[in-house]
């Protein structure tokens, strides 16, 4: 980011920055391009206090951890109750949550406890003179930057490899996959020479990067045309992804439930069956994946069948809103808790890849059934969820045009970023 300061000294840039700021003020989004972020926030700490930090491990319980710090049974019960009523914390997550214990001296009892359930939130528990515990939640101030990365597909490349080469973090790349999978078939739509880009959030606290946030915009020059998606906050505060025209980009179903899985057999009305040897229709798409790979539900719905037959092996069938059903076959096992009648969310694991039934090796056989008829998952037109009403659409288009200007600018100045 060193070069950024030089850029900032030029008049042209100042004009662009002002132009951008004006544009984005229109859509109630404060935007400037800057070279540094003010250092604010952070944790309050008492210099004289003795602090013990406990990182939660698997098998740890809140009361077990509190007990080890010398807190009495009565105090533990009180702290557990206060955490629940005051901060909604009922359990701990191993390898994620941290707890700090403060004492006036090594020998003194604990008089302050800080539970850290996220880098952006701290729950402070303090003991008053009467011995009662009080709880106070502190939100950690964060500075968010929008960062732009772009790349190109090379010969023999996958989108994943090209994305890594472009410096897109793995977690963001996975989110981008999830989004693009609604519109693209990574097997057939990806060719050498295609360009892609992503604008995403990086979160900073006290000047240090903590984590990545949301994908704000993504663009891919796919074979079937340029695919663009933008994250947009509606007037009611909910967010969604929309295409250039403001149509909902998130579809009710996914064409490829497993990210980055290779299509090994396509939908066809006639094909030679690899096990049976004779020609018959292939009513779904096969995705190669290792045994045990989680299979996510392609869309929200209700499980209507979960069982075994000689062809499909272990399979799950889900009925979605409207006229669609999906089927997942050859599973090694079902996800526990997913039974006939279970309501599932889009992306929720329903089972695991295997090779049960008529199968030559581990893969997911995936079918989409529309109004009782099998359709090609890779080409069927899928309904969008979360469309915009006219007022929101107008606002979206304004926002999208402003964001596009920002992206265009970042494309020419890849070392810069937008402060949100
Ligand atoms: Zn199949």
Image (spheres, grey):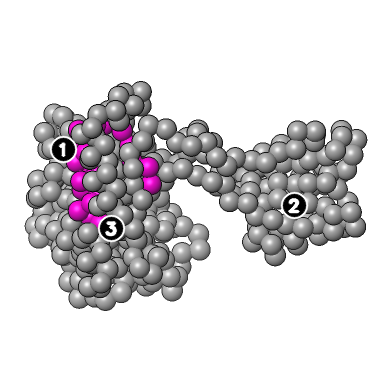
Of the numbered discs in the image, which one, if any, rests on residue 195? 1
Whether 416 is among the magenta residues is yes
Q: In the rendered structure, are the residues bearing label 2 and label 1 in contact, judged by CB atoms less than 8 Å apart?
A: no
179 lies above or below 38? below
Give the quarter of the image for residue 168. top left
- Of circles 1 and 3, the one toward us is 3
Which residue is disc 2 drawn over? Answer: 125
Counting from the top left corner in percent of width and height, residue 360 is at 26, 45
280 lies above or below 34? below
> Observer-nearest residue: 327 or 233?
233
365 lies above or below 119? below
Tell me if mark 2 has few (under 14), some (14-19) or many (20+) residues whose alpha carbon lies within 10 angstroms of its own: many
Of the numbered discs in the image, which one, if any, rests on residue 183? none
Q: Does label 1 point to a residue whose CB lies under 8 Å from ligand 1?
A: no
Which residue is disc 3 drawn over? Answer: 26
Q: Which mark is first along the chain, 1 or 2?
A: 2
Question: Is residue 377 something that shows in the picture?
Answer: no
Tell me if mark 3 has few (under 14), some (14-19) or many (20+) residues whose alpha carbon lies within 10 angstroms of its own: some
Question: Is residue 13 something that shows in the picture?
Answer: yes
153 lies above or below 334? above
Q: Residue at x 42, y 43 (%)?
A: 144
Quadrant the N terminus occupies: top left
Distance CA(mark 1)–CA(mark 3) = 30 Å
- Of circles 2 and 1, the one toward us is 2
Question: What is the span of residues highlighted in magenta in the rendered image?
Answer: 399-420
Whether 239 is among the magenta residues is no
């Amino acid at each position: 980011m060193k070069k950024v300061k030089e850029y900032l000294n030029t008049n042209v840039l100042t004009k662009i920055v002002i132009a951008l700021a004006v544009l984005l003020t229109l859509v109630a989004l404060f935007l400037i391009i800057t070279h540094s972020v003010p250092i604010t926030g952070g944790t309050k700490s008492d210099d004289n206090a003795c602090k013990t930090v406990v990182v939660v491990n698997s098998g740890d319980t809140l009361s077990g951890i509190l007990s080890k710090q010398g807190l009495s049974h009565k105090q533990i019960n009180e702290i557990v109750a206060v955490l629940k009523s005051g901060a909604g914390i009922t359990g701990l997550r191993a390898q994620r949550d941290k707890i700090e214990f403060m004492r006036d001296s090594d020998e003194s009892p604990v008089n302050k406890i800080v539970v850290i359930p996220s880098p952006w939130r701290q729950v402070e528990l303090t003991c008053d003179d009467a011995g009662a515990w009080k709880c106070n939640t502190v939100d950690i101030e964060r500075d968010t930057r929008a960062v732009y990365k772009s790349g190109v597909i090379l010969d023999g490349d996958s989108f994943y490899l090209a994305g890594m080469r472009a410096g897109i973090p793995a977690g963001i790349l996975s989110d981008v996959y999830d989004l693009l999978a609604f519109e693209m078939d990574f097997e057939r739509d990806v060719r050498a020479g295609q360009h892609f880009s992503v604008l995403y959030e990086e979160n900073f606290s006290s000047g240090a990067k903590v984590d990545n946030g949301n994908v704000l915009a993504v663009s891919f020059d796919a074979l079937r045309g340029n695919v663009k998606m933008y994250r947009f906050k509606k007037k009611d505060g909910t967010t969604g992804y929309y295409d250039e025209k403001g149509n909902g980009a998130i579809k009710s179903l996914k064409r490829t439930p497993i990210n980055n899985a290779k299509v090994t057999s396509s939908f066809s009305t006639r094909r030679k069956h690899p096990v049976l040897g004779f020609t018959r229709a292939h009513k779904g798409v096969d995705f190669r994946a290792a045994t045990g790979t989680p299979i996510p539900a392609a869309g929200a719905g209700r499980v209507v069948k979960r069982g075994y037959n000689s062809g499909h092996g272990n399979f799950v069938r889900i009925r979605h809103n409207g006229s669609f059903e999906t089927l997942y076959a050859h599973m090694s096992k079902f996800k526990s808790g997913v039974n006939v009648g279970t309501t599932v969310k889009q992306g929720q694991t329903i089972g695991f890849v295997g090779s049960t039934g008529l199968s030559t090796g581990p893969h997911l056989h995936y079918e989409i059934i529309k109004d009782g008829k099998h359709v090609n998952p890779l080409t069927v037109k899928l309904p969008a969820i979360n469309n915009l009403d006219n007022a929101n659409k107008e606002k979206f288009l304004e926002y999208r045009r402003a964001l596009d200007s920002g992206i265009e600018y970042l494309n020419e100045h890849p070392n810069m970023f937008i402060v949100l």
